[in-house]
Amino acid sequence: MALIAPSLLASNFLKLQEECEMLNNSSADWYHLDVMDGRFVPNISFGLPVVEQIRTATKKPLDVHLMIVEPEKYIVDFKNAGADHITIHYETCNHLHRNIQQIKSLGLKAGVALNPHTPIILLEDIICDVDIVLLMSVNPGFGGQQFIPNTVAKIRSLKKLIHQTNSKALIEIDGGVTLENASALLHTGADVLVAGNTVFKSANPIDTIAKLKITG
Ligand code: DX5
Ligand code: ZN
């Protein structure tokens, strides 16, 4: 069955505790936390203090997506704030292998994220070292954007690469995931769906999460 990771970027920050309780009572598997620095992406979201507070509100894994330059400078801080998974962008790392090893040496799951324009083939020499590959299905920086259809072809080639190399990496899709496209994504090979607006702007988020989960 699919893993569902609601993105709290679309939640009501004034009611963060209630939003966390809702997620705890739902079939959501991970909390997806989008950290943006206004440099790698043209937006600023939230950082360490918010992650730290969310940690006290749930036992579910915190899936931290770092959309920041020089992520290596903050990996230890995000671990201390309570992250269980840390995903860094291919485009921000000159020393991706070193940074992935750093995340894993802290006992966390390590993920690499690709922007929509970054080809799968660039993962050939790192695919066996990562626990998660996050494919951006919108340009990172904002929630509520339209899904980029080419992502489906990327899932297909990533799945192939994972099979060929016996990698254990999970495929996570992030951006523009809806109740309409979820099933195609899962049938093509996605393991984890991130959903922000689809969950938090729906009339019944718990129900929406359940629907996303049974789609696969
Ligand atoms: C975008 C973020 C996504 C975003 C998804 O930069 O990485 O996680 O919150 O939001 P939706 O699901 O609304 O597209
Ligand atoms: Zn994200």
Image (spheres, helix red, strand yellow):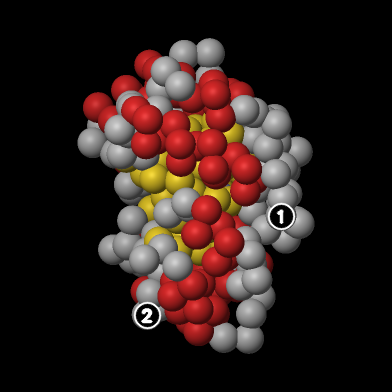
The residue that label 2 is drawn on is 25
Spot occupied by residue 130 in the image (x, y as percentages of width and height) = 36, 32
Looking at marks 1 and 2 on the same chain, the residue that comes earlier in the sequence is marked by 2
The answer to whether residue 45 shows anywhere in this view is no
To which quarter of the image does residue 196 belong? bottom right
Residue 22 percent coordinates (x, y): 45, 78
Q: How many marks?
A: 2
Label 1: how many Cα within 10 Å (few below 14, some 14–19, many 20+): some
Find residue 201 and report its image quarter. bottom right
Check the picture and name the quadrant holding the N terminus: bottom left
Tell me the mark number nearer the camera, choosing from 1 and 2. 1
Q: Is residue 107 above or below residue 5?
A: above
Classify 61 as above or below 22: above
- Asked whether 110 or 78 is in front, the reply is 110
- At x 32%, y 33%, the residue is 167
Work out whether 42 lies above or below 53. above
For residue 213, which numbered disc appears in the image? none
Query: Which amino acid lies under the numbered mark 1 shown in the image of this protein?
Result: Phe
* 172 horizontally vs 84: left or right: right
- Does the numbered disc 2 mark a residue whose Cβ is under 8 Å from ligand 1? no
Amino acid at the residue labelled 2? Asn
Give the SS element for disc 2. loop
Task: Tell me what residue is drawn at x 41 percent, y 63 percent.
Answer: 2
Q: Residue at x 58, y 34 (%)?
A: 114
Pointers 1 and 2 in contact (CB under 8 A)?
Answer: no
Element marked by disc 1: loop
Q: Disc 1 designates what residue?
A: 147
Residue 52 placement (x, y as % from top left): 40, 52
Image quadrant containing the C terminus: bottom left
Q: Residues within 10 Å of mark 2 (few under 14, many from 20)?
A: few
Tell me: is circle 1 under 8 Å from ligand 1: yes
